[in-house]
Image (cartoon, rainbow, N blue to C red):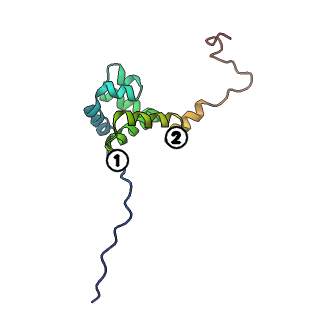
Amino acid sequence: MTDTPPATPSAPRKTDHLQGVTLENLLNQLVDQYGWATLSDLVRINCFRSTPSIRSSLTFLRRTPWARAQVEAVFIGFKDGLEVEAIRGRLKTMAAGDGLSKAAQKQKSAAAKPRKPGAPDPWKKARGE
């Protein structure tokens, strides 16, 4: 019979606040905490501004990776106990290109692709050229 030493605790892991949380649950928690007005100030999307509802927001967020990444960042800031201004700063960092999810980076790079040579510029008239 040998005595085994107690297991040493592993290094503390960073808590993943998104683990096991559905998008609907996440959104409900944010609306309960901040309300639609503050959410629309943090994440500027029309489904938070114009007749906001959980259903329309879920539809939009499931189809739009960059918006979902921002809402998830707000949720993580909320769970970390950050104030609204600190969350806003985190979102500005994301907008600069740091911290975008892979899907959002892919969507952003696809939108920035140059047009084929000789293709008409659809915005030329709007810019007054």
Mark 2, other Cα within 10 Å: few <14 / some 14–19 / many ≥20: few
Q: Quadrant of residue 84?
A: top left
* Relative image position of residue 102 (x, y in whole percent): 52, 43
Is residue 115 left or right of 58 when viewed as pictured?
right
In the rendered image, residue 56, in percent from the top left (x then y), is placed at 34, 26
Establish if 119 lies above or below 30.
Answer: above
Query: How many marks overall?
Result: 2
Q: Amino acid at mark 1?
A: His
**Which image quadrant is residue 9 in?**
bottom left
Query: Can you identify the residue that label 2 sits on?
Result: 98
* Residue at image coords 49%, 37%: 93
Q: Position of residue 13 (x, y in %)?
A: 38, 58
Report the mark closest to the observer, 2 or 1: 2
Q: Tell me which residue sits at (59%, 35%) in the image.
A: 109
Reading the chain from its start, which is encountered first: label 2 or label 1?
Answer: 1
Q: Quadrant of the C terminus?
A: top right
Residue 24 seen: yes
* Residue denoted by label 1: 17
- For this rendering, which residue is in front, 6 or 123? 6
| Alpha carbon separation for disc pair 2 and 1 | 19 Å
Question: Does 23 sit above or below residue 8?
Answer: above
Q: Which labelled disc corresponds to residue 95?
A: none
| Observer-nearest of 36 and 90 | 90
Q: Measured from the top left, where is residue 71 in percent x and y?
A: 39, 35
**Residue at the extreme right:** 118
